[in-house]
Image: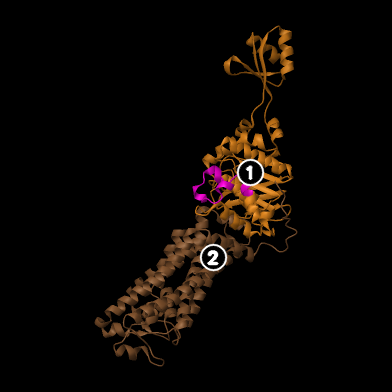
Amino acid sequence: MITARGLTKRYGSTVAVDDLSFDVQDGVVTGFLGPNGAGKSTTMRMIIGLDHPTDGTVAIDGTPYRDLRWPLREVGALLDAKAVHPGRSARSHLRAIALANKIPLARVDEVLDIVGLTAVAGRKVGKFSLGMSQRLGIAGALLGDPKVLLFDEPVNGLDPEGIAWVRQLLKGLAAEGRTIFLSSHLMSEMAQTATDLVVIGRGRLIADTTVEDFVSSHTVPTVEVRSADQVALADALRATGAEVAPAADDALSVTKVDAPRIGEVALAAGIALHELTPVRASLEEVFMEMTSDAQEYATSAPITEDPA
Amino acid sequence: MTALSLDPGTDHGRAGLTEAIRSEWAKLRSVRSTWISLTIIVVAGLGFAALFSALIASNWKHSSPLDRAQFDPVRISQAGSFISQIVVGVLGALVVTSEYANGSIRTTFAALPRRTTVVAAKAIVTGVVLLIVTELTAFASFFVSQAVLLASGGKQLPAGATLMTQIKAGVIPVLSITASGVPMALLRTGLYLTLMGVLAVGLGFLLRSTTATISLYVVFLLVIPILIQLLPSSIREPIQPYLPSNLGVAMETVGSKQTDFAGVLLDAWPATAVIVAYAALVLAAGATLLSRRDA
C-alpha cells in the first residue's frame, strides 16, 4: 500500500503538488488521473524518493522509500521509458539495475521474456522504438519482483496490441495482490484498466474513489427521447417534475426521471415513443468537466510543465 | 509471473556500496565511450613517448645547449599524459553526466536512495579502472621511450652519473627503470591522471551537464594557466604551483623542486597531496549538493 499524507511540492512560488493525501490499495489497479502538468510525475518522483517533498510524507507499507533496504525488490517504477543510455544493450541495462539491488542475473532474462524483448536483448537501446522502450521500462520495473509497481503513462507509444498487453499485464499483477499505481491523462485507458481512481488537477486532490463511483456520482442520469410529438411530450414530462432540454437531431434530453417513468408518461399522454435511450457520461466527459476549473486556472497562472 | 525467491526479509543487510560498485562497473564497461577513452590513453601514451623520443634523438646534434640541458628522459616518456589528462576528465564527467543527460540517473537513485553511496561507487570504479590503465601506460611508455632513445644513439646512464654530466658530454642519456626516483615519478603520473578523473566525477555531480563539466575542467586545466601569464609575477607566482596542470608536471618530475616553463613547482609528494585534496573536496561538494537536490 502507498500512503500519501499532506504531500506538497513547491518550486519557488509555484505549487506543483498541493496537500495531497491518498491511499493506493493492494490487489487492484489504481488509476492516477489528471491533465498534463497536474503534478502526477512530481508525485510519483516523491513516492520513490527522487524529489524531496516540501511538506508531508509518503510511505510504502509504512516505510519511507529511502529507508527501504532493497528498494527495487519492494517497489518497481517506470517513470520515463527513454531514460536509458542509448549506447547500452537492453540486457546490459537490466543487468546493471539488477546488480544494484543484488537481484539474481537470471531474472534479467526472465523479465526480457515477460515483456517480449528476448530477441532484441543484445541490441543497443538507442535503436529501440518508443514501444520497445516502454517494454524495456516495464521489464526494469518488474526486475525485483516488487509488491508495489508505479507506471507513469506506460502505454505511450504502444500499438493497440501493446496497449492490450499492458492492460492484461497490469490486471494480472494486481490479481497477484500487488499494488499497482498507474498514471495517465487518458480517461479511456483508466476506464479499461483501473478499478480505483485518484484524480488530481493543478496539484490538488479532486477525487479518491473508484472508477464506477466517480462516474456515477459526477454524472446526472440522462435519457434521450424521440417521439411522434416532441412538444406535447416535453410538456407532459415537465408536468411530472422532469427537466427537459433540446438535444441534437430534435431529440429531448430528459433528466430527473428515469426511462420507465418517461415511457409511462408517454403512454398516458398517448404519444408514440420512437426512441428512449439512457445516456451515461463517459469517464472522459466526467474528467473534462471535473478538471476544467483546474485547467482554466492553469492557463492564467501556468504551473510547471510536468517533465515527461 | 513466477514468484521470485527475493523476499526482502531473507536477504540481510541493504543495498550498499558493494552493490553500487558492481552496478557501476557493469555500466562503465557496457558503453563504448569507456573503451574509446581508455584506448586513447594507451595509444597517446605509447605513441607520444615513441614519437617525441625519436624527434629529440634525431635532432639532438642540432639542439641548443639549453634544449639539451632541459631534456628529461622521464618527462619525455610521459608526453602523452598531456592528452590523457583531458581524456580522463571526459571519462570521469561522462560517468555522471551521461546519466543526467538521458535521465537514467533516476533509475540509479531509485535503486540506491542513499546517494552518497552512488558518488562513492562511481568515484571508486572510475578511479580503479583509470589507475590500472594509466599506471600500465606510464610504465610501458617509459620503456618504449627509453628503447627508442637507446636505438637512436642514446647511452644508458651509468649508476651514480648525473643526467647533466652525460648531456654535457653530448650523449643522449637513457634511464633505467631502477634509476633513482624513476619508478615513483611514473607511479605518480598514473596517480595524477587517476585523481583528475575522479575529480571530474565530483565535478559532474556538481554541474550535472556534460558541456558545463567538461568546459570547466578544461578551463581550469588549460585556460587558466595561460590566462594567468597576463598577471604580474607577484600575483602569478604564488598561484602557479597550485594549478592542476602544474601539480601534474610536479608529480611527473624526478627529484625535487625544479624550474620549468610553468614557473616554480611544488615538490612531487606535496603536489600529490594537493591533487588528492582537490579531488576529495570536489567529490564532497558534489555529494553534499546531491543529497539536497531533487533528482
Tell me if residue A130 comes above or below residue A214 in the rendering: below
Q: Report the residue that reaches farthest toward the bottom.
A: B160
Q: Say the numbered circle drawn on residue A204.
A: 1
* Residue at image location 51% in from the left, 65% down from the top: B201
Side of A117 relative to B177 (left or right) = right
The image quarter in which residue A206 lies:
top right
**Where, quadrant-wise, is the C terminus of chain B in this rendering?**
bottom right
| SS at mark 2 in the image | helix
From the image, give the main secondary structure of the stretch colored magenta: helix
Asked which colour scheme the image uses, the reply is by chain
Say whether residue A74 is visible: yes
Chain A color in figure: orange
**Residue B27, position as x, y percentages in the image:** 55, 59
Side of B157 relative to A227 (left or right) = left
**Residue A274, position as x, y percentages in the image:** 65, 11
The image quarter in which residue A194 lies:
top right
**Residue B87, position as x, y percentages in the image:** 43, 66
Report crowding for label 1: few under 14, some 14 to 19, many 20 or more residues within 10 A (C-alpha): many
Image: magenta residue range: A111-133
